[in-house]
Image (spheres, rainbow, N blue to C red):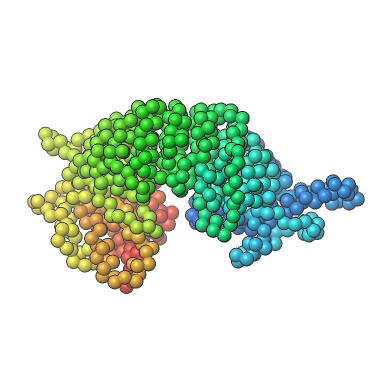
Amino acid sequence: MSLFDIPELAEHVGFHLSSHDLTACIRVNKTWNTLFTPHLWHTVPPPPGPNESAIYKWPYFRRPQIFRQMAREDYHAAQLRQEQEHHHDNDNDNENNHPLPLLSRHGHLIRALGLVQHHLRDPQAVQRFGFRESRLQSSYFSIRAGAISNPTDLELLSYLLGRCTNLTRLRLLGRCLNDNELESWKRIVRTGLPVTLMDLTIKLDSRVSLGKSPFPPVLFSRVSLRLHRLSLDIKLSGSHLRLQLNQQTTMEEDGDGEPLPLLRKVRVTCLDKKPYPPSWPRFLSRCTNLESLRVSSIDQNWIHALAGCVHLKRLRLKMINSVSLRYLTSALRSGLPNLDAIHLDNSPLDTTDRDKEDMLSACHKGWRSIAIPRMGPLAIQTLIQHCSTLEALDLTMAYGLTSRDMQQILSSSPRLVTFVTLECDDHYSYHVNEATHILATDFIDVDLSSNSLKPWECESTLKVFRAKISGIPRPDITQTFHGHSVKDGMLVQEAHPNQSQEILHQVYERLGRLTRLERLELGHEDRNTFDESRTFDDPADVESGDDEDHQYDCLDMNLRSGLRMLEGLKQLRVLSVVRMATLIGVEEVQWMVQSWPKLKRLDGLNYGESDEVAAYKWLREHYPRIQSFQCDRAGISK
């Protein structure tokens, strides 16, 4: 009996194979071909492998010209068949019995499809940008397709959707910059979307804002009753300066107004402050069981529709100002009884601490997840009142967050899973040095009566800790990150001999109690490492700025100071000590990979320390699967 005589087992195995493995499987024999062909065509384009470059994120093809050629073959073959039927051309039996092109044969197997409009452009237009069309052509296509004109990119996109009759997930990336493209997109959403869709994403470059575009009302009126998730992103394109779009006033389409009970997640965004279209509140009122909503901003035209989303649990806003926050506060006070997760993006628009405090105070059931940048002291104190329900906190650039506040949150939040005060590393944009930190004495939190660490409520729940721990004396440090003399004020002095080792030991003990930690990130890259000025400015000035922002009063992550106390962190996957004065050698790295079997990433080994350079090389040589970012000169000319 073959392993794959059990269909359920073959189904399970197929979903864990890469496209390369599936291609090999279907060539084994007819039985395997039948079993694994549906898996090979399940997702088009195939998702990138774990080791592929991030530039090929789905739905971008590594070789779009091959797929385009395959799609054009299918399109032309269909046109030829229609031409034959029209002229009753039945003279050539061999031609009529020719096998169908790939997409016609296997399109019904595709469940997840991602299409990028410019990938489907006419090959002559694509060649002007330096690409060469694939030579993938069947004899059938090459003989008969010569007299048929090439379809436009949107005609080809519409045709492909007609071939994929069982889609459940669809992602379309394109543009809507003139009247022809607008009409094509409207036609696609009116008649071209499969009724089987459950997840639909459309991203369009447009010359008009979300509120003025004629496209969103058409989409809202044609949403399938089976849809679970809808995402529409409109991006204002600078290319509209040379293109024209007729902006005549048209009647908005309301559709049949039926409720959409299966639609749980909606995202409709545009990076501008214009109001949403009048069709938006009508559509929102049809989403009777909506649980997650992401929008650019809130305006007074649909505040009542928002308040009526009684099942809404998660809300994210991209463009934040005081007016939007006041509208949200009003909606919270009059409705939204189940909203317990709020995410405000780091918008450059002005907000006040009082506005954030009022919004947080209006929650009915207690906040579960809060991600709000630049929180002041009023908002922080209101947040602390919700510690009993908090599961995730993201408080970057929180100027009102003190070390004692951080201690109180960590010690009294029994459900806390994620605690973040540091921004993610971003080497392309400028970051203000993150001043928020928790002092080592507050992090240790000693019970003076017993001289032992107080138990924290989050010890058995916390999985992500991303914050600076500072205030640790480090008498071993004699030079800066770039090897210069230490300046006054850079180091914390010991109050008594051996104080440094005592504090280090207790900090390790506290971290060791967080046994479910998966990400421990104590530092981050705060330099704009791709800024050209780092190469052309005076190296001494750049180095001076780097040295001042480096962490010196931090953990040394050395075995002699107590690193072994973290041996119990068996779930740890990511360790970041970027921009920290650590003392990690080969021995420490060897201990880490042995003690933390799930470790996937280790960042921050310093370029200027010979031991850390050796540790970095050892890790790359012996554990190449573990990714590592070395903290180096970052473009400073030598």
Q: Position of residue 6 (x, y in %)?
A: 63, 35
Query: Does 572 appear above or below 357?
Result: below
**Residue 152, quarter of the rendered image:** bottom right
- In the rendered image, the quadrant that contains the C terminus is bottom left
Q: Nearer the viewer, residue 482 or 557?
A: 482
Q: Is residue 598 visible?
A: yes
Q: Nearer the viewer, residue 340 or 77?
A: 340
Determine the residue located farthest toward the left in the rendered image: 496
Determine the residue located farthest toward the front in the rendered image: 249
Q: Nearer the viewer, residue 105 or 9?
A: 105
Q: Position of residue 173 (x, y in %)?
A: 57, 49
Query: Does 246 appear above or below 539?
Result: above
Viewed as shown, does residue 422 lie left or right of 180?
left
Q: Nearer the viewer, residue 288 or 581?
A: 288
Viewed as shown, does residue 284 lie left or right of 86?
left
Q: Is residue 460 visible?
A: no
Q: Residue at x 32, y 59 (%)?
A: 527
Q: Residue at x 27, y 62 (%)?
A: 546
Q: Residue at x 24, y 40 (%)?
A: 377
Q: Position of residue 408 (x, y in %)?
A: 23, 36
- In the rendered image, the quadrant that contains the N terminus is top right
Query: Does 194 appear above or below 86?
Result: above
Q: Position of residue 492 (x, y in %)?
A: 15, 54
Viewed as shown, does residue 174 lie left or right of 561?
right
Determine the residue located farthest toward the right in the rendered image: 91
Q: Residue at x 30, y 34 (%)?
A: 358
